[in-house]
Amino acid sequence: MNRERGVSHYGIGRTFRVFFDLLTIRFLLRYLSRPLHFFGRRHAQCSAGWRIGSFSCVEKFFYHFAIMEAHGPLMMFAAVLILAGVQLVALGLLERCRCVITTSPPSACPIRSIASSAPK
């Protein structure tokens, strides 16, 4: 049976778009009201930087190793991981503040009452 009008827009390309839309909806429903659960997990993954840095400091101070000569790129990688972890936690805290401010009633939010009573 042939179509009366036009061409069908359903196909394998649309299947992928619908699948990614469903993943997006699942992500938003899961983490929209508790963003620290998402960003906290990423911070835990980035805490490997602290372990790498601690190991390198032990080598430097107890075994008198020339760290930058022996493990220079590893130390830079550890620094990037530490900074990424700190930024993710800060972003999670900011998002949590936004959730509290936008979802709580005005009387339950001391930040809103302080901001509204400030002189302009």
Image (tube, rainbow, N blue to C red):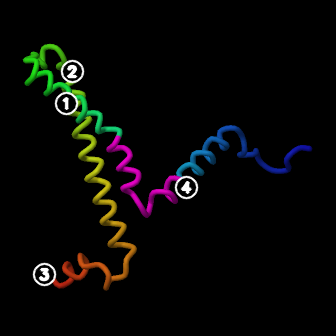
User: If you read the primary sequence from the N terminus, does the residue marked by circle 4 or circle 2 appear first?
Assistant: 4
**Does the magenta portion include 28?**
yes
| C-alpha gap between disc 3 and disc 2 | 51 Å
Q: Nearer the viewer, mark 2 or mark 1?
A: 1
Q: How dense is the environment of label 1, judged by Cα within 10 Å: few (below 14), some, or many (20 and up)? A: many
Q: Amino acid at mark 1?
A: Gly
- Mark 4 or mark 2: which is in front? 2
Nearer to us: label 4 or label 1: 1
Q: Which residue is mark 4?
A: 25
How much space separates mark 3 and mark 4, taking CA atoms?
A: 40 Å
Question: Which image quarter is the N terminus in?
Answer: top right
The residue wearing badge 2 is 73
**Residue mark closest to the camera, 3 vs 1:** 1
Q: Amino acid at mark 3?
A: Lys
Which residue is under mark 3?
A: 120
Q: Pinpoint residue 3: horizontal percent, then vertical percent.
A: 85, 47
Residue extending furthest toward the top: 70
Is 8 colored magenta in this rendering?
A: no
Residue drawn at (19%, 31%) of the image: 54
- What's the magenta region? 26-44
Quadrant of residue 96 within the rendered picture: bottom left
Disc 4 to disc 2, C-alpha distance:
39 Å
Task: Pinpoint residue 24: horizontal percent, then vertical percent.
Answer: 53, 51
Nearer the observer, 63 or 43: 63
